[in-house]
Amino acid sequence: MAGNTFGQLFRVTTFGESHGAAIGVVIDGVPSNLPLTEADIQPDMDRRKPGQSKITTQRKESDIVEILSGTFEGKTTGAPLAMLIRNEDMRSKDYANIKDAFRPGHADLTYELKYGFRDYRGGGRSSGRETACRVAAGAVAKKILARQKISIIAYTLAVGDIAAKTIDTSVIEKNLVRAPDLKAAEAMIAKIEEVRKNGDSIGGIVEAVVKGCPPGLGEPCFDKLNARLGAALFSIATIKGVEFGSGFKAAHMLGSQNNDTFTAKGGKVKAATNNAGGINGGISSGEDIVLRMAVKPPSSIAKVQKSVTNALEETEIQVKGRHDPCLCPRVVPVAEAMIALTLVDALMIHKSSQV
């Protein structure tokens, strides 16, 4: 199976399945002498792990990360960094009733068509469980970015038609949905509870802001920074759309409205607005990188749905097990991780092109 490695100079390879013994990640290209222990990685793992609140899946995984190689005496050695996360709370029997049927919205059918075989236990390799590996790698990338004073913060901007009215980043980790607006968060949580009780699920929007990104990242023409960030975020299965800056609103604007006019300030060229989202011509401008992701409603729902078996017989299925009614709160740390991995790789590529 190809497609399990991400990045060019900072290369991340993930492995493992949802109901296997363990999942893990190997990173090649980690610089040496970076202070790093499991304690640096665990906080982000805890933000993504299942069972952390009443509005997430109740699968209980500690998601304790183990560093297997690539560090010595609390610092990276420059060798490949390998990390392992053991699976502890699998219930494969929950999927026995649908092993021969294709779940709507999932990768069951496409995996069967591509490989002629699939792991039906929670989706196997296509499961969101794999994203724990990305978060572990992303925590390492964040430490590298911090040295360059680059920070990434993501949050739930909307759940269904309920949107945050204010952006207060200090409250993101103080509510279950990871919204930047406590009042809106209460309404979001109530909505998620409502759809869960009805056996359904709901989508939303996650926004991310990168601060401190230097200008010059991104390689035209086919490795534009926004193109690489888009590819990274679209590799998260639940993401159905990505926009930068004014995004799709730009389709309804005039050029005179959407253009970011320039001013001279502090000996630098500064943009008066940031409709470009911090990227022009595929290259970072030095302004904040602002992007948003459309998160689809989780496909595993308790409602009875029509389907077809692998014997081409029409049937009805009901997905059992423990699933998220809304993925936005847990997508937040995954999105941050994929952005961090992209930026570290872009930084290394940029530096390699300079004399």
Image (spheres, rainbow, N blue to C red):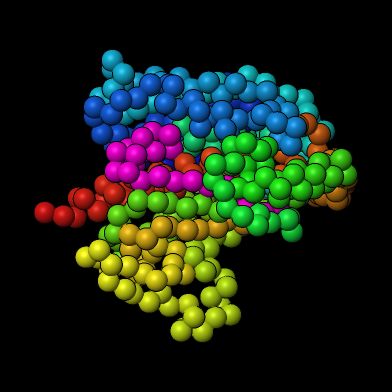
Q: Position of residue 315 (x, y in %)?
A: 87, 47
Tell me if I can see residue 126 in this picture: no
Q: Residue furthest top?
A: 73
Boundaries of the magenta span: 138-159
Residue at the spot 73% in from the left edge and 28% down from the top edge: 58
The residue lying toward the viewer, choosing from 76 and 249, is 249
Instruction: Judge from the rendering whether residue 77 lies leftward or rightward of residue 142; answer left or right.
Output: left
Quadrant containing the C terminus is bottom left
Above or below residue 63? Residue 120 is below
Q: Is residue 204 left or right of residue 313?
A: left
Residue 68 in which image quadrant: top left
Residue 172 point in image, percent of width and height: 59, 42
Residue name at image x 30 percent, y 54 percent: 214
Q: Residue at x 60, y 21 (%)?
A: 62
Which one is nearer the viewer's eye here, 308 or 277? 277
Q: Residue at x 62, y 36 (%)?
A: 174
Q: Measured from the top left, where is residue 303 in percent x and y?
A: 87, 44
Q: Nearer the viewer, residue 79 or 55?
A: 55
With 346 as the anchor, is 354 left or right in this view? left
**Residue 174 appears anywhere in the view:** yes
147 drawn magenta: yes
Q: Position of residue 191 (x, y in %)?
A: 80, 47
- Total marks placed: 0
Q: Is residue 5 magenta?
A: no
Outermost residue, front direction? 266
